[in-house]
Amino acid sequence: MPLTIAIDGPVGAGKSTISDAVASRLGILHLDTGAMYRAVGLCALKNGLDLDDEKSVSALCVSDECRVDVRYENGAQVTLLNGLDVSREIRAQEVGQAASSVSRYREVRQVMVDRQQEMAKSQPMLLDGRDIGTVVLPSATVKIYLTATPEARATRRMLQLREKGDETPYEEILKEVNARDYQDTHREVTPLRQAEDAILVDSSNLSFDETVEKILSIVEAKQ
Ligand code: DC
């Protein structure tokens, strides 16, 4: 079986950027599975669906109107919706919320999980998400649960937003982080949780580089 690394954790723990750095140091591809749920969320928004309507969201997800694909350009993930590159569009705050909503549904999750397992079958890969160690790759070579306190995650998010000129107040960001944590850990279908055999990495007091090094050392020890 090819090398598989599962990194799960709550919103704002830095999974995506940390995973990118770890995968590139190891010379393997990184699949950001959240991007796939975001593409479904975007599709549902574009079609004007009520995100609480499980039936219509699920029907859309399995239809030809909502083809989510991933391709790699120079090692970097490009997320496609119906053949169009939506990698930037899916980063909007509103799309993140929509992704969290649509990811509650069993059928949506099944389509995504099948696609993710297919991709990780034939090549060494690092996948990050919420259910990688528990559902997508239960026998991953290495499982990491990457987290940080809600306050640390909200502070990081605030600094990122400030860089883009977005002045959303800290309290509002913290509220959003807590709301997403609640939704992701309380949904009925495969809620976010640490796999029993996952190694906990708390990055609250670690720099970006320290977190990357810590994960690389865990991978090295496992191999
Ligand atoms: O990691 P992210 O914020 O881009 O993910 C967006 C949403 O998608 C997140 O709120 C929960 C959902 N998600 C999921 O349920 N399972 C995954 N493997 C990845 C993301």
Image (tube, rainbow, N blue to C red):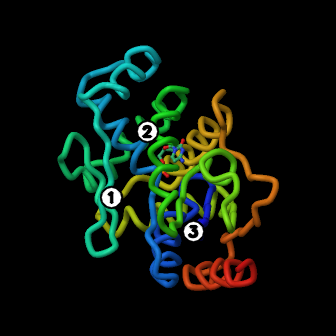
Mark number for residue 99? 2
- The answer to which of marks 3 and 2 sits earlier in the sequence is 3
Q: Nearer the viewer, mark 3 or mark 1?
A: 3
In percent of width and height, residue 110 lies at: 52, 33
Depicted 203 relative to depicted 39: above or below: below
In percent of width and height, residue 166 lies at: 33, 58
**SS state under label 1:** loop
**SS state under label 2:** helix
Frontmost residue, 192 versus 60: 60
Q: Nearer the viewer, mark 2 or mark 1?
A: 2
Q: Which residue is mark 1?
A: 166
The amino acid pointed to by label 2 is Ala
Q: CA distance from mark 2 to mark 1?
A: 21 Å
Quarter placement of the N terminus: bottom right
Evaluate if marks 2 and 1 touch, with contact meaning CB atoms under 8 Å apart.
Answer: no
Q: Which residue is mark 3?
A: 2
Q: CA distance from mark 3 to mark 1?
A: 41 Å
Disc 2 residue: CB within 8 Å of ligand 1: yes
The amino acid pointed to by label 3 is Pro
- Near mark 3 (Cα within 10 A), the count class, few <14, some 14-19 or many ≥20, is few
Evaluate if marks 3 and 2 touch, with contact meaning CB atoms under 8 Å apart.
Answer: no
**SS state under label 3:** loop
Q: Quadrant of residue 55?
A: top left
Depicted 115 relative to depicted 221: above or below: above
Q: CA distance from mark 3 to mark 2?
A: 29 Å
Res 147 seen here: no
